Amino acid sequence: MSTEEALKSQFPQAGLVFSQFRDNHRIGVPAAQLMDILTFLKNVHHFDMLAELTAVDYLEYEGSKDRFGVVYVLVNTQSGERLVLKTHVNDPDPVLPSVYPLWKAADWLEREVFDMFGISFSGHPDLRRILSPDEFTAFPLRKDYPLKGRGERHNFPVLTRSDG
């Protein structure tokens, strides 16, 4: 049984949206069903590798109903099958469950999405900024972040290099 058929039979009421481009299989997953579906894919269909976790800001995209899309790229290392799952979250409190309990690779990937987009992952063991300083209050990959920034650097400490 294919992964798509198994998901359709296991989660008939979930509202999954399937698509394919070339050999890239994609599934739209409601946020409420995300952990159940990811757990099923890992434990039953052996998607044992989280290759990527990222986000997309759909602010001002024509026809978009949701603000953020969170994308998970899974790989079954035995068969080589790849699967792309996308779910959506919205402001004012974009939160998804952490997939760290399923794949330890989610640790830094979720921290990066949190740091750049402001999307939180409940249950993450150490959700804090990974690329920006702790005192940075904005999210630079959001579409409403100005290209020249907001003047945040005024409160950053000045670092000088020692001669040597």
Image: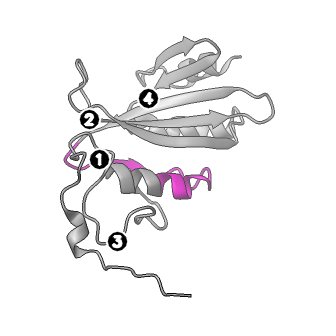
First along the sequence among labels 3 and 2: 2
Q: Residue at x 65, y 22 (%)?
A: 3
Residue 77 percent coordinates (x, y): 77, 36
Query: Which residue matches tag 1?
Result: 94
- Pointers 2 and 4 in contact (CB under 8 A)? no
Mainly helix, strand or loop, the magenta region?
Answer: loop
Label 2 Cα crowd, 10 Å radius (few <14 / some 14-19 / many 20+):
some
Residue 4 percent coordinates (x, y): 60, 18
Query: Can the viewer see residue 129 in this picture?
Result: yes
- Pointers 1 and 2 in contact (CB under 8 A)? yes
First along the sequence among labels 1 and 2: 2
Q: Is residue 106 magenta?
A: yes
Above-or-below relation of 146 to 128: above
Q: Is residue 108 magenta?
A: yes
Magenta part of the chain? 91-110
Q: Nearer the viewer, mark 1 or mark 2?
A: 2
Residue placed farthest to the right in the image? Answer: 78
